[in-house]
Image (tube, helix red, strand yellow):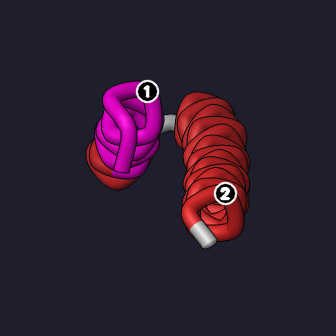
Amino acid sequence: MTVAGDFYTDQARQCAQAAAESDLPMLREKYLNAGAAWEALARRETTIADARARRIAGEQAREQALLANRQD
């Protein structure tokens, strides 16, 4: 996972812990909502990082194919 993804996941974990420790229903709801937002950011970051890795791998494969064709 990326640094940003790790940060988002950690924030979601902290919100879940704060929600579990909260005695006030509205505060608990606030932490649960914030945690859900952090989790969504973490999932989005993972999706973006995966797409970036696939794109880079594809670019490298094309470059290698071009080099191989030039050598022939």
Is residue 54 found left or right of 14 in the rendered image?
A: right
Q: Nearer the viewer, mark 1 or mark 2?
A: 2
Q: Residue at x 40, y 45 (%)?
A: 9
- On residue 70, the disc is 2
x, y percent for residue 45: 62, 42
Residue stretch rendered in magenta on the structure: 1-16
* Camera-nearest residue between 16 and 65: 65
**Alpha-carbon distance for marks 1 and 2?**
40 Å
* Camera-nearest residue between 3 and 31: 3
Earlier in the chain: of badge 1 and badge 2, it is 1
Q: Amino acid at mark 1?
A: Ala
Q: Residue at x 57, y 29 (%)?
A: 27
Q: Residue at x 59, y 55 (%)?
A: 67
Quadrant of the image occupied by residue 69: bottom right
Q: Is residue 3 magenta?
A: yes
Would you place residue 45 above or below residue 65 in this image? above
- On residue 4, the disc is 1
* Camera-nearest residue between 42 and 14: 42
Q: Amino acid at mark 2?
A: Arg
x, y percent for residue 72: 62, 72
Q: Secondary structure at mark 2?
A: helix
Dot 1 and dot 2 residues touching (CB under 8 Å): no
Q: Is residue 28 magenta?
A: no
